[in-house]
Image (cartoon, grey):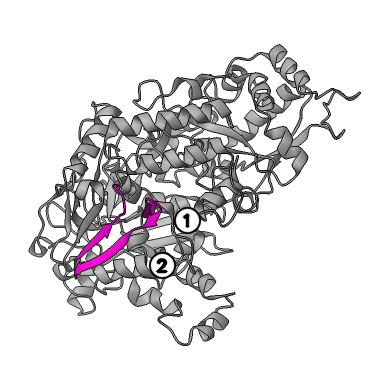
Amino acid sequence: MQRDTSRGSSGWVGSLTARLMRGVAIAPLLALPAFAQDATGEAPALADLVAAGDLPPVAERVGEEPEVVTPLNAVGHYGGDLRIYLRGSSDHNHILRVVGPQGLVRWDPQYTQVVPNVAERFEVTEGGRVFTFYLRDGMKWSDGEPFTADDVMFNIQDLVLNNEFAPTPPRYTSGGEPLKAEKLDDYTVRFTFKEPYGDFLAELASPLGQHPVLYAKHYCSQFLPSYNDDIGALIEANDATDWQNLFLQKCGDLEIPARWGNPERPTLDPWIIKEPYVGGTTRVVMERNPYFWQIDTEGNQLPYIDQMIAPIDQDVESLILSVIGGKVDFGLRHIDPPANRPVLAENREKGDYHFFEAKSTGGTDMSISFNLTHKDPDMRALFNQKDFRIALSLGMDRQAIIDTVMLGEGEPWQHGPFEDHPYYHEKIATQFLEYDPEKANALLDGLGLERGEDGIRRMENGEPVRFQIDVIPTFDPTWVDSLQLIEQQWAELGIDMEINPMERTFFYERTSNSNDHDAAVWRATQSWVPGQIPQMLVPVHHDSRYGIAWRDWYLSGGTAGEEPPANVKKRLELYDKARGLTDPQERIATFHEIADIAADNFEVLGVSKAVPTYGIVKNDLMNVPDSMPSSWYYPTPSPTLPQTWFWKDE
């Protein structure tokens, strides 16, 4: 059931935190009390399997405590396919956004509070140190095997806390120590942290917070040496390099294509893989999970839609043609730049679709990060001069970019929350936005970067000031268009910038893993609320491309990467403090302290304030909201529960 969203973000920040810290159990926003006997309706194909004795009755499949969901506008009916699309071989997160990260908790549709999901309820006690999750009695994996506390313990003890598999993600640590997990009974688990952790539930509600329930122990344990004495044979049989590689092949991870590449892997998702996302495939198909654990208010097992079908297009132009041709039922990702809206609007009747609003949560749709930990000492020295970065910001005519590329939508902006948000920080959002090439040239002259005969400035070693900006053209076509204008504007300053378009997989490898980039483009659409990773304020994430070596130092506890300067270390210290705070106003004040330091160092250049965009939805697809938040951390559209969408009767 969608609710009025008239209250502001400040109300959410305060009410959510206060509610959590009182230590009460929180009931689902969209749910009612549920019992197995309420589950009576099921898809006709599943009913036929039950009648044939090939599948248990629906009441047994959903367990004793399914979640009862109130659909947005109407109780639906079964049938049909949901056609989305994928852009190439690395668009796995589009699947995740629609299928949803089925974690212990999720965001409500309005992005205002965290509600139970896989967990039937939860309690927060001891001032935010102890989190107790009550699982759904009788819940099952997609293959019919029981889902219990043993699965959660496997995910935490054998994977999250297993440094041989991967370093423990920061979201599962507090006070420099990882959580402690306890099984209280078959359907109750408790996580205890060293210090209060006010952000933890919001972290779990993000797409990256599903690890506690991502892997089925009865299936995925066979790929761990501690459970399989003959693991070597499996490694060899699957051409894997080691057991870790084998595990990722078979069970995937949060953000890799292999998550959707193995039809044998049990999940908790509403739809499960039928035709996998593997190299060379032309489409991905997912079919309904017969053991999915949600029902509607009339006892019908969800999802309503039989299959999700995702054809793979190789470029955005093909996606637009698919939409116009009526071959896409729901679309947002890749198609929503302003330049596409006129042609999509003109063809609404032909394509039988309408627009929905996708509301930005803050920040900028395009930021440029210079690599301050560059491997080349001369490039590092250049990029680390604050006046160099200021000069390039002042030499950027943002209004011209907005008028030309974004059809006049937007306003000059660096990054950070909007003015009406409680986290708004004026300096980090608005400094050095004016277009002032004269001042920019003076700053560059002051750095001793003299122009050569070709007009290009020279570094101290005599080499031209020349660098590349890595970008993924297919992620947002406006990025390359904007960079082309910036390239011309910076050329007037004597700066030779080259645009380096890359496929997404190579982009990540070069900019986030190998640290081989000069500079890179990415979004910074954030308001810094709990659950969002403020990667442009602190180098803690693979999108913190101004300081990847600092990120490695932070995530490794100082054993890898490069020790950052004092101002960065101070921000990291404050960030760790902020994650644990239980008082919303104290958290805001701490983030403003972080932003003060980040603004003084001015590491990231923004272009324009993120503006509301749009998606398309077929006219006969029901229960899709007319407006929804647009954010990776939300993640759009999964909290609107696509499993409740259905096709209108003809």
- What range of the chain is rendered magenta? 171-196
Return the residue nearer the eye: 467 or 60.
467
- Please state the horizontal and vertical placement of residue 382, each as a whole percent of the image: 73, 33
Q: Quadrant of residue 67?
A: bottom left
Residue type at the position of mark 1 = Glu
Q: Position of residue 439 (x, y in %)?
A: 69, 13
Q: Please tell me whether mark 1 sits on a helix, a strand or a loop.
A: loop
Can residue 415 be seen here? Answer: no
The reply to whether discs 2 and 1 touch (Cβ–Cβ < 8 Å) is: no
Q: Is residue 130 left or right of residue 630?
A: left
Please tell me which residue is depicted at 55% across the width and 48% down the height of the picture: 551
Placement of 333 over or under 229, stated as above or below = above
Looking at the picture, tell me which residue is in the foreground, 549 or 570: 570
Residue of label 2: 159
Mark identifier at residue 6? none
- Residue 42 location in percent, x, y? 19, 63
Q: Position of residue 611 (x, y in %)?
A: 45, 26
Numbered disc 2: secondary structure:
helix
In the image, which disc is placed on residue 255? 1
Most extreme residue toward the right is 453
Give the residue type that dot 2 points to: Leu
